[in-house]
Image (cartoon, grey):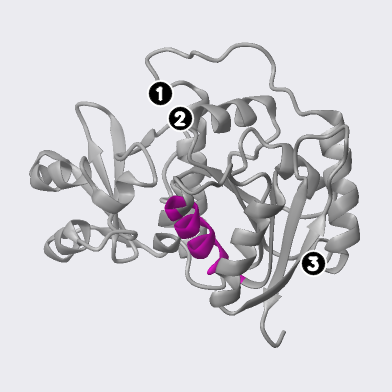
Amino acid sequence: MLNLGEDECVFLAEESLEDLIWLPVTRNIVAEADDFDRAIAVNDRTLALYSEPRDLWILITDLYSEIRPVSDLIRRMDCRRVNVNADDLFQAIVECLSVSLMEGVFCESCMESGAVHHPEDRVSRLERMLRELLDDVVFDGASVLEVGCGSGTGTMVLRTLGADPWAMDIDRCEVCQGLRSGALDPMRTFVLDARLLPRFFSAESFDAVMGFMVGLIDDSNWHIWKEIIARSSSLARNTVLYTVYSRREAERVADLLGTLGWEGRLIDNSSSIAVYDQWVYLGWREGS
């Protein structure tokens, strides 16, 4: 992307996608830009700075922020310029953060141990349900975002059905376990509060948005889940699907999305031998 040699090291300045909104490290680097020896501007809002003493490149960007310290710096600098597709840049950032997470860069110690468990009965029930409900959505090369992926149970099912989903969760440890086990793809998996998704994706960026076992939703936390579901669903063009534990949770989701222009139905997927994905909300945009 930067046309550098294979042995040259590039590090992302910030430690998370959320930090790319607030730029705590980037603002300090911009203030010390004179200490770097070379620079490559990527489009208009991303900059790679080379430090000769450290023999590394540091990548900074304000592409996802409302403030523009990097853009202002680029305008003042005489540097080599390259053009990169914005989607390719985002994927590269996601992969960099995923690899760093797997390698323990962001953790002093790992509290997790043992292999990740993906219950076979849940996997098979999810696969049967999705084949029945979403045959035309999942199998036709559709773009899918999975919200609350955890360690990747639903992601594995979606891949089995032919999708190549983007997957995200706020729990860094769960995501790390899923990445290390191979259930999650480092090029398409990221850690983020779902309420911040619209900072990185425009409205209706995906054909479908799904979340498996969102919740548990109750009166005390509904204000949080309301934001998560509303903002996640705004990224879907055609279809949303959420599974929950109880009918009451599914009704909350249905009532909310009904006010936001979605039509939908509740599906009883309960089983006496299962705990997960007991109720399903399947929604589509009004008039579609």
State the image coordinates of residue 74 (x, y, percent, origin top left). 19, 61
- Whole-number angstrom distance, CA of label 3 to CA of label 2: 33 Å
The secondary element bearing badge 1 is classed as loop
- Whole-number angstrom distance, CA of label 3 to CA of label 1: 37 Å
- Nearer-the-camera pick, 214 or 38: 214
- Whole-number angstrom distance, CA of label 2 to CA of label 1: 5 Å
Disc 2 residue type? Ser
Query: Contact (CB < 8 A) between labels 2 and 1?
Result: yes
State the image coordinates of residue 169 (x, y, percent, origin top left). 53, 42
- Nearer-the-camera pick, 165 or 59: 165
Does the magenta run of residues contain 235?
yes
Residue 104 vs 251, above or below: the answer is above
Residue identified by numbered label 3: 137
Say if residue 1 shows up in the picture.
Answer: no
The quarter in which the C terminus is drawn is: bottom right
Residue 102 vs 5, above or below: the answer is above
Residue 142 vs 124, above or below: the answer is below
Residue identified by numbered label 1: 105
The secondary element bearing badge 2 is classed as helix
Which segment is the magenta one?
223-236
Disc 3 residue type? Val
Query: Is residue 20 toward the left or the right of residue 150 in the image?
Result: left
Residue identified by numbered label 2: 100
Question: Disc 2 or 1, which lies upstream in sequence?
Answer: 2
Does the magenta run of residues contain 52?
no
